[in-house]
């Protein structure tokens, strides 16, 4: 079984919460941390990486926070943004078992992962 880095797991959860906001209102990292039962420091690290990789929107200021970016986001996208060691230094080709797994993983969306 594949063990994701904690940052990847938190990132997937945060993106799922952002996608569920009805009106796209930004959520602060401290609010996301509370909803996901993780530390605010970890959540801020994760959200900065997601925003830097255009997987989450970021607005600064008193009414700021992080928001959902419309479009398809894969688990692989989150893993890349978090520099997950599962991907580091590995030749991911169709010929390898990991390459085959990764190819399927990239096609999965956070919605698919949560539903299963």
Image: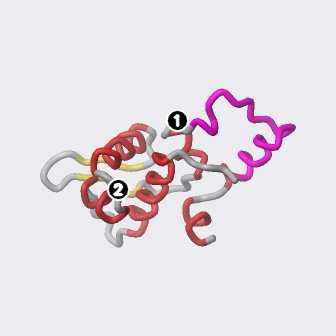
Q: Nearer the viewer, mark 2 or mark 1?
A: 2
Q: Is residue 60 left or right of residue 10?
A: left
Residue 86 is inside the magenta segment: yes
Residue, disc 1: 83
Seen from the viewer's position, the closer of residues 40 and 79 is 40
Residue that protrudes farthest toward the top in the picture: 89
Q: Is 21 rendered above or below residue 68?
A: below
Q: Is 73 rendered above or below residue 79?
A: below
Residue 43: numbered disc: none
Q: Residue at coordinates 39% horizontally, 45% vertically from top-left?
A: 46
Which segment is the magenta one? 85-104
Q: Are marks 2 and 1 in contact (CB under 8 Å)?
A: no
Q: Residue at coordinates 60% horizontally, 46% vertically from top-left?
A: 76
SS at circle 1: loop
On-image quarter of the C terminus:
bottom right
Residue that protrudes farthest toward the right in the picture: 95
Please identify the dominant SS of the magenta region.
loop
Q: Residue at coordinates 58% horizontally, 51% vertically from top-left?
A: 75
Percent across and percent down for residue 24 are 33, 64
Percent across and percent down for residue 70 are 46, 57
Considering only order in the chain, which callout, 1 or 2, is on the residue closer to the N terminus?
2
Percent across and percent down for residue 58 are 30, 47
How many other residues sit within 10 Å of disc 1, few (<14), some (14-19) or many (≥20)? some
SS at circle 2: loop
How many other residues sit within 10 Å of disc 2, few (<14), some (14-19) or many (≥20)? few
Q: Residue at coordinates 76% horizontally, 42% vertically from top-left?
A: 98
Q: Is 12 rendered above or below residue 87?
A: below
Residue, disc 2: 38
How far apart marks 2 and 1 lie (CA) works out to: 19 Å
Could you say which quadrant of the image residue 33 lies in? Answer: bottom left
Percent across and percent down for residue 89 are 66, 27
Q: Is residue 33 left or right of residue 71?
A: left
């Amino acid at each position: 079984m594949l063990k994701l880095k904690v940052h990847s797991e938190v990132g997937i959860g945060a993106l799922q919460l952002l996608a569920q906001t009805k009106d796209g209102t930004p959520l602060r990292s401290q609010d996301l941390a509370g909803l996901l039962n993780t530390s605010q420091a970890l959540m801020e690290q994760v959200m900065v990486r997601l925003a830097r990789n255009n997987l989450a929107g970021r607005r600064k200021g008193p009414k700021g926070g992080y928001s959902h970016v419309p479009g398809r986001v894969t688990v692989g996208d989150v893993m890349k943004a978090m520099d997950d060691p599962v991907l580091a230094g590995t030749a991911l080709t169709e010929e390898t078992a990991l390459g085959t797994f990764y190819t399927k993983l990239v096609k999965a969306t956070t919605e698919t992962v949560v539903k299963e």
